[in-house]
Amino acid sequence: MHEILIVEDEQIIRDSLNRLLSRHEYKVTAVGSVMEAQKEGVQGFDLIIADIRLPGAKGTDLISLAKPAPVLIMTSYSTVESAVDAMKQGAVDYIAKPFNHDEMLITVNRILKNTSLEIQNKALRRELDNRNPLNQLLGQSSVMKDVIDRIHRVAQTDTPVLILGETGTGKELTARAIHAESLRSELPLISLNCASIPENLLESELFGHEKGAFTGATQSKKGLIAAADSGTLFLDEIGELSLDAQAQLLRVLQQGEIRRLGSNKMQYVDIRLIAATHRDLRQMVDEKVFREDLFYRLNVIEINLPPLRERGDDIILLADKLLDSLSKRLQRSDYDFSNEAKRLLKSYHWPGNVRELENVIERAIILSNNSTIEAENLGLNWNNFTHNSSSDEMSLDEYFIDFVRKHQHRLNETELSARLGISRKNLWERRQKLGIPRTG
């Protein structure tokens, strides 16, 4: 049921409108001034109908006070100037007095219907934005801007792409962004982490097999490369492929041909290949464990994803985004970080990159006692902090001293070192270095 607020100082008109809208199954609240309207909480209504001339303040004042609730202005002075002025200030529409009941009902129904559609459209746009992987690659740092620019440039081609980066930097998300921006976006994106499949099954998984091709092959199977025909194939951790599988993949890239295990027939496929790895493929080529010809076939366009510790203020940008989405997912109230927590987030080394950041924030939400995430809620390992300058070193030492002095009266050394993510020996060494004696 839609809730409507009537703001009209003339009792007869106010009561008449109340009865009219109530009869048509609207929930109505009626008041006589802007001040009384504010007491009702103007932003909680689906529509506000206000006279332009009211005691104390004009009805148009509600336009800014009630946002995003739409305001329909009533006026006895139905001049073009007053109507234009109300619309310029943001009124959804105006209606001139005297009006008949049908005119009012039609106007109210139209406004509510349009407002509902607008809300649905905004929600749909947000959902579509969230589904677009490119919108999830957040970052204002120069290195991330270069990554996003390269994605835009390569996406519209069929050129193979090699994505390099540490574990947890977002290689699969980058691959999905390239596919989503490509001409093949409506066709399949097939992904495989080569490290997750045993070596003796990997070729079968990629190229397929015929019934009886090996022990346990009780029926024919279509491989993932065939499944990706006309679309995109993403091979994560491509450095884990055996030399035999590398040779077959090279044939796919050169001739567009695959052959199932146990079959003599060739099948033609058209795929766009995106590969990723955290390993040094050039070194693997030198060590003769990765084919040089395949490496050069793959490495036409290279995208290097920076580790989180090198992304500066992007860390806080990502942390705020993750905090918002995770708190909603966990059905908790809105959370924010204390200044001390933000400082530690930027100083931490992040060996697990964005994936580790997400895990840290989720744990902090669950364990925190209020809606502010404090530094101690993060549970960061003290051995993984970076020191970019003497001032950073001092600030971290100051935090260490403050934390120890604040908690050593109620925590023993084992508990204190666990909270700091360090060993008892490391805690003792830092006490000596910073001059923090143990208390009784």
Image (cartoon, rainbow, N blue to C red):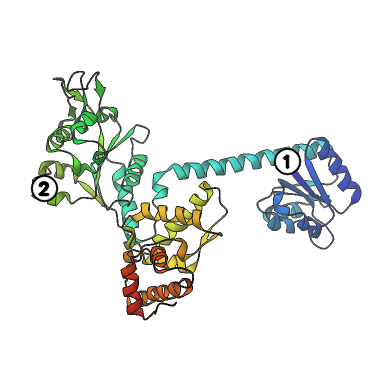
Kindly identify the residue that appears in the image at 22 percent across and 21 percent down: 217
Find disc 2 in the rendering and name its residue: 285
How many C-alpha atoms fall within 10 Å of the one at disc 2: few (<14), some, or many (≥20)?
some
Of 240 and 432, the residue lying toward us: 432
| Marked residue nearer the N-terminal end (1 or 2) | 1
Disc 1/disc 2 C-alpha distance (Å): 68 Å
| 18 displayed left or right of 112 | right
Question: Is 219 left, or right, of 107 in this rendering?
Answer: left
Q: Nearer the viewer, residue 283 or 362?
A: 362
Measuring from the top left, give residue 208's x and y in whole percent: 22, 26
Residue 304 picture location, percent across and down:
26, 53
Tag of residue 2? 1
Q: Identify the disc placed on residue 32.
A: none
Establish if 157 lies above or below 347. Answer: above
Q: Where does the image place residue 13, in percent across and percent down from the top left? A: 88, 47
Compared with 128, 255 (above or below) is: above
Residue 169 drawn above or below residue 158:
below
Image quadrant for the N terminus?
Answer: top right
Name the element at disc 1: loop
Task: Residue at 37% x, 81% y: name it.
Answer: 435
**Mark 1 or 2: the one toward you:** 2
Extreme-front residue of the structure: 440
Q: Residue furthest bottom?
A: 435
